[in-house]
Image (cartoon, rainbow, N blue to C red):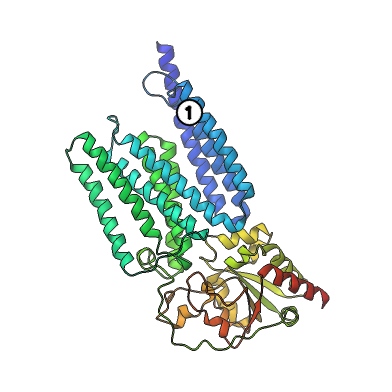
Amino acid sequence: MNTLTDTISNGDKILEFSYLLAAIFFVIGLKLLSHPESARKGNLWAAAGMLLAMITTMFLHREGTPLVRIPSGNLAIILVAIVVGSVVGAVIARRVKMTAMPQLVSLFNASGGAASALVALIEFSNPDNQSALVTLLGLVIGAIAFSGSMIAFGKLNGNIKDIFAGWMSYVNLLFMAAVVAGVVFLMVTNAPVETQQVMVYALLGIALIYGVTFVMPIGGADMPVVISLLNSLTGIAAAMAGFIYQNQAMILGGIFVGAAGMILTLLMCKAMNRSLLNVIIGAFGGGGAASDREAGTVKEVSVTDAAVLLSYSSKVVIVPGYGLAVAQAQHVCNEMGKLLEANGVEVKYAIHPVAGRMPGHMNVLLAEADVPYDKLVEMDEINPDMPNTDVVVVIGANDVVNPASLDDPSSPIYGMPIIKAHEAKNIIVMKRGMGKGYAAIENFLFYNEKTRMLFGNAKDSLQKLVAEIKSL
């Protein structure tokens, strides 16, 4: 008997130590993820920590006297699920295109939120459950993260359109109040278990609907902020599930994800000069009033003239946007940059905090094309150099260079800091046409007297530019 007790005690100690070690791996991973050059290693460290926590939990976590808590039949099912999930994840990771990366992140967020919500739903009626509040919070936050992330996935994938209407704010506030009231009521009610179970399902339904109404109005430059916020909610929901099972690895992992996501969300809001509440309730795009300003005249530039202008410049700044990702033009863009540098031109890339469709989208895109990290310059650092820039090349970016944010109080993006491309000596804008950006508002940069439009697919235009530069 003592031998069995000693074995169980040793198993508990090993399990606790493995959780501590996993937490250290998570911290190292997060630290390495803070820079693109070390991000790959950071992912591996964090994955190793999670793998360690999973293995030790399966074989050492106990309930009562048995050393292995999970029955052998369930363990087999779990192992099969892990293998299948790993294979599917590996295939998706290898096949997904960079343009679809924001959708994939949203899908991952949804999966994590759904898992946490299901855990809370199952454990609510468990008599051994220690905390009803934690369970209900896990249910609500997980459900919101799931439905909100699925809507974000649909919007980013082009399957769902934004709904911009003033009444949506009141609808969101109504659902938020209903969710809070439902949690409080379930905490204080003495209703029969069957009635409480029905109410929990009703609360789940309300939370799912709120996740939908919360994300539906949001678009434009707010989308990366929302994805970051949903990621934070998924982490918090995972932490709640960890509290339910008293699992330190889940708690620590959830806290790290939740805290990192919330810090990133707040930093992005600060960079956009907006509060988080303003992002959630007063979303960009779609609902902006039409401007009274005259559009002006669009002036085009030929590929040859653009190549000459770029080749004989001293300083060129490239502003990448979602259009660059859609065209998969990052590699040829880097090739053009290298050719210009070979001709003695200083080339830098201006990165807006919310360019693309997820946090760091442009950094990841250009890193994939082996653009040196020291050439990626953040908005606040590049803006003072714009008046001394000979040519700024805007490739697929729209809202993040729109001067309406500075001089048009009626614009829905008014007050959002932008890359001040309009201050450069010459501006070349690469676009397929005169379509509006994701915020669905006019961009008067296109009509600036210093702007020349180079119409066409970004990749095709860049390839033609590369050929012209080589021929000079």
Q: Is residue 76 above or below residue 208?
A: above
Of residues 187 and 197, the one nearer the viewer is 197
State the image coordinates of residue 214 (x, y, percent, origin top left): 37, 59
Query: Which quadrant of the figure contains the C terminus?
Result: bottom right
Asked which quadrant contains residue 128, the reply is top left
Of residues 380 and 182, the one nearer the viewer is 182
Of residues 1 and 444, the one nearer the viewer is 444
Q: Is residue 186 above or below residue 368?
A: above
State the image coordinates of residue 240 (x, y, percent, origin top left): 36, 42
Work out whether residue 228 can be spotted: yes
Work out whether residue 358 can be spotted: no
Labels in figure, total? 1
Query: Which quadrant of the figure contains the N terminus?
Result: top left
Q: Which residue is mark 1?
A: 58
Farthest residue toward the right?
Answer: 471
Task: Name the residue at 52% across, 74% down.
Answer: 436
Farthest residue toward the top?
Answer: 1
Amino acid type shown at disc 1:
Met
In the picture provided, is 314 more to the left or to the right than 444?
right
Asked which quadrant contains residue 431, the reply is bottom right
State the image coordinates of residue 236 (x, y, percent, origin top left): 39, 47
Task: Name the residue at 30% across, 36% down.
Answer: 124
In the picture provided, is 463 more to the left or to the right than 164?
right
State the image coordinates of residue 101 (x, y, percent, origin top left): 57, 55
Element assignment for label 1? helix
Number of other residues with Cα within 10 Å of mark 1, as a class: few under 14, some 14 to 19, many 20 or more: some
Task: Name the residue at 33% across, 70% down.
Answer: 166
Asked which quadrant contains residue 446, the reply is bottom right
